Image: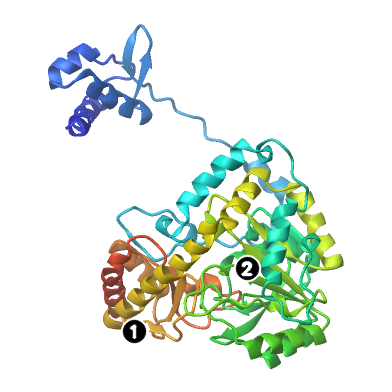
Amino acid sequence: MNNDSSSRIVVHLKKWISSAAPGAKLPSTRSLVAEYQASPVTVQKALQTLTAQGLIESRPGVGTFVRAVRSARPSDYGWQTAALRSPLAPPPPASSTMRNVANDAISFHSGYPDRELLPERLVRAAIARAARGDAALFRPPAAGMPELQSWFAHELGASTPAGTTPPNPSDVVVLPGSQSGLSSIFSALAGRGHPLLMESPSYWGAILAAAQAGVRIVPVPSGPDGPDPAELARAFDESGARLFYAQPNYANPTGAQWSAERREQVLDVVRAKGAFLVEDDWAHDFGITSNPVPVASRDDSGHVVYLRSLTKSVSPSIRVAAVIARGPARERILADRAAESMYVSGLLQAAALDVVTQPGWQTHLRSLRHQLESRRDLLVTSLRQYAPQAHIEQVPKGGLNLWARLPDGTDLERLTRDCEAAGVIIAGGNEWFPAEPAGPFIRLNYSGTNPGAFPEGARIIGQAIERNRS
């Protein structure tokens, strides 16, 4: 009731303010209480709302007044045009996956899992414990907390077969999120103006990091089973590249997972070319009907630079990741990171380590697997029923996303606009291609909010596709 009364007072006072002169004094609180027959608390809440909107201002001991509108002088930043000069490369537009949308929208666009899929209890307890410890006050080593380095090394070492030397904790560099790791890897191991091979389609953030690092992307087509080894070898030969970026497990956006044979074939090509494979294992914790097997677990000669993130599976607010690299490559990456940020917050490192070493972490991951499976299957079923025009070539065995091919000739911009007008937010597939798109695609995240709305969202998408074709 108070909320309704407060809103009513705000509406009435806005009308009065719109016709009042700047600086006009509002009636006293006592007068407003009597006029609107509301409590003093309700009136104060209404006045606070108007103050926050910049319509009124309070002068202690004097009263409340209509705020005078001050015309600001337009700022002139023209001098910066000459100072900054032209950018070396035009910056890519911000990704649609980072948009914030209304709570009542059916959101398929986000790159992050819903809050209910996070280990919230573990995270809150871990942050509280970290705040009480030394990590809250002391600077950690540049390469990361030794205990967290050991955890990352041990996790990868657990999947390393006999005959292959597992990584050492000293091979690990802790990062403030995998995105900063990509920037450092591309800068340190490729360098501005040099070629970088990249799966196509590929993670939009890697495309952005490559653009910022000034490297030249050479797309390598990749399908449900990963890149063709012969095509990869040809791309190395023709471009002279020595760096290949890929996501062998549950690739973003396609959900593809390389087979054991394909992992060996790609690794053989990388070794033969004296090159590096940058393995982005972003979805390591999101297996559904299979388990992730890192290519890095088969390499002990430093050809694979392994990137492992905890941001999406632990919490978006705990941006902690690690890169595992051996030899001089590790030193170059560490030098770049030190120049960029010196070290990663010890508080965040301690909290991340606390979460993943709790017994409840493994329990959470087992539950997460089942939740993702039910969400994925619901969205697949809904699309096949209501939007059969959106062809899903492969149901992913893990990850967070479905990748759907649309009919040729689909106007992707119009489709996303029509869906949004109907309350459904989707991500057009063009931003996942480092060169020209291979066709019209959309990426749909099944780990977002309100899975109960998936059928309705699929119905709206299907109708929008039909209108697009007419």
Q: How far apart are marks 2 and 1 (CA)?
A: 28 Å
User: Which residue sits at x=62%, y=68%?
Assistant: 207
**Residue 331 vs residue 94, the one in the foreground:** 331
User: Which residue sits at x=60%, y=87%?
Assistant: 259
Q: Which residue lies under the disc numbered 2?
A: 207
Res. 94 in view: no
**Which of the 4 image quadrants contains residue 332?**
bottom right
Amino acid type, residue under disc 1 in the picture: Gln
**From the viewer's perspective, is residue 347 above or below residue 10?**
below
Dot 1 alpha-carbon crowd within 10 angstroms: few under 14, some 14 to 19, many 20 or more: some
Mark 2 / mark 1, whichever is N-terminal: 2
**Residue extending furthest toward the right:** 328
Give x and y (percent) for residue 324: 74, 65
User: Which residue sits at x=61%, y=75%?
Assistant: 247
**Residue extending furthest toward the front:** 359
Give x and y (percent) for residue 458: 30, 73
User: Which residue sits at x=68%, y=38%?
Assistant: 134
**From the viewer's perspective, is residue 398 above or below residue 263?**
above
**From the viewer's perspective, is residue 114 above or below residue 376?**
above
**Which of the 4 image quadrants contains residue 462?**
bottom left
**Residue 159 vs residue 262, the one in the foreground:** 159
Name the side, left or right, on which 257 lies relative to 244: left
Considering the image in quadrants, where does the C terminus appear?
bottom left
Dot 2 alpha-carbon crowd within 10 angstroms: few under 14, some 14 to 19, many 20 or more: many
For numbered disc 2, what is the local secondary structure? Answer: helix
Amino acid type, residue under disc 2 in the picture: Ile
Residue 389 marker: 1
Give x and y (percent) for residue 167: 77, 69
Considering the image in quadrants, where does the N terminus appear?
top left
**Residue 133 vs residue 244, the one in the foreground:** 133
2 and 1 marks in contact (CB < 8 Å) = no
